[in-house]
């Protein structure tokens, strides 16, 4: 079991779009194992590869007993019904803000055998799918906040001891 160190807001890997997985070998299997091991702690719903410093389109999830991963995920369906949810992020620990998300979401991608996989969910799973795909697109949930909320989030983040800057 390998618990990978997390990357925090300010680290450029979190703002860079991730590259597609093109080789399905032992290194990708090891990455998936690390993502699954690292998300398997209380209070963790999802983890994208950039959050552990890997710029590839891969994420793991652990929501209500449903644990898995998706390689090369793309959001293919979002419900028109939206709702406001309190959202946090492992890369911005200790912060949470109200974020607007679709109530239902569907992601399509592939597994370690490069076989198609679809994950659909509502509530927390839908929020997780949207949040993790955002990470792979170089977005953080604070990028979706209203301007005043975003300013507050940035101010709070800069004051944290984990804030990463060069």
Image (spheres, grey):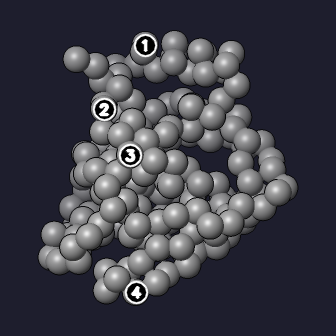
The answer to which image quadrant residue 13 occupies is top left
What secondary structure is found at the residue carrying circle 4? loop
Q: Give the spatial CA distance, label 4 vs label 1.
A: 44 Å
Q: Are marks 3 and 1 in contact (CB under 8 Å)?
A: no
Residue 65 in sight here: no
Q: Residue 146: x, y in percent?
A: 70, 25
Q: Which residue is mark 3?
A: 17
Residue 91 appears anywhere in the view: yes
Find the distance from the CA under tag 4 to the CA under tag 2: 31 Å
Q: Dot 1, how many residues are within 10 Å of its Cα: few (below 14), some (14-19), or many (20+)?
A: few
At x 59%, y 15%, the residue is 151
Q: CA distance from mark 3 to mark 1?
A: 26 Å
Could you say where residue 78 lies in the image, as x and y percent from the top left? 71, 61
Question: Which of these two is toward me, 27 or 38?
Answer: 27
Q: Is residue 162 left or right of residue 129?
A: left
Instruction: Please tell me whether mark 1 or mark 2 is closer to you in this view.
Output: 2
Q: Estimate how packed mark 4 is, as few (under 14), some (14 to 19) or many (20 or more) residues with alpha carbons within 10 Å.
A: few
Which circle's residue, 3 or 1, is located before the other in the chain?
3
**Callout 3: SS:** loop
Total numbered circles: 4
Where does label 1 land, which residue? 159
Q: Is residue 28 left or right of residue 10?
A: left
**Quadrant holding the C terminus:** top left
Comes first in the chain, label 3 or label 2: 2
Of marks 4 and 2, which one's residue comes earlier in the chain? 2
- Label placed on residue 12: 2
């Amino acid at each position: 079991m390998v618990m990978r160190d997390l990357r925090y807001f300010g680290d450029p890997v979190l703002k860079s779009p991730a590259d597609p997985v093109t080789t399905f070998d032992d290194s990708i299997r090891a990455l998936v194992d690390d993502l699954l091991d690292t998300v398997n702690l209380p209070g963790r719903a999802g983890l994208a590869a950039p959050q552990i410093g890997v710029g590839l389109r891969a994420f793991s999830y652990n929501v209500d007993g449903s644990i898995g991963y998706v390689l090369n995920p793309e959001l293919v369906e979002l419900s028109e019904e939206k709702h406001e949810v309190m959202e946090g992020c492992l890369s911005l620990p200790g912060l949470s803000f109200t974020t607007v998300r679709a109530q239902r979401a569907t992601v399509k991608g592939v597994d370690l055998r490069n076989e198609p996989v679809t994950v659909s969910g509502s509530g927390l799973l839908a929020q997780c799918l949207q949040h993790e795909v955002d990470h792979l697109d170089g977005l953080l949930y604070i990028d979706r906040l209203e301007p005043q909320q975003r300013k507050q989030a940035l101010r709070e983040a800069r004051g944290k001891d984990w804030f990463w800057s060069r």
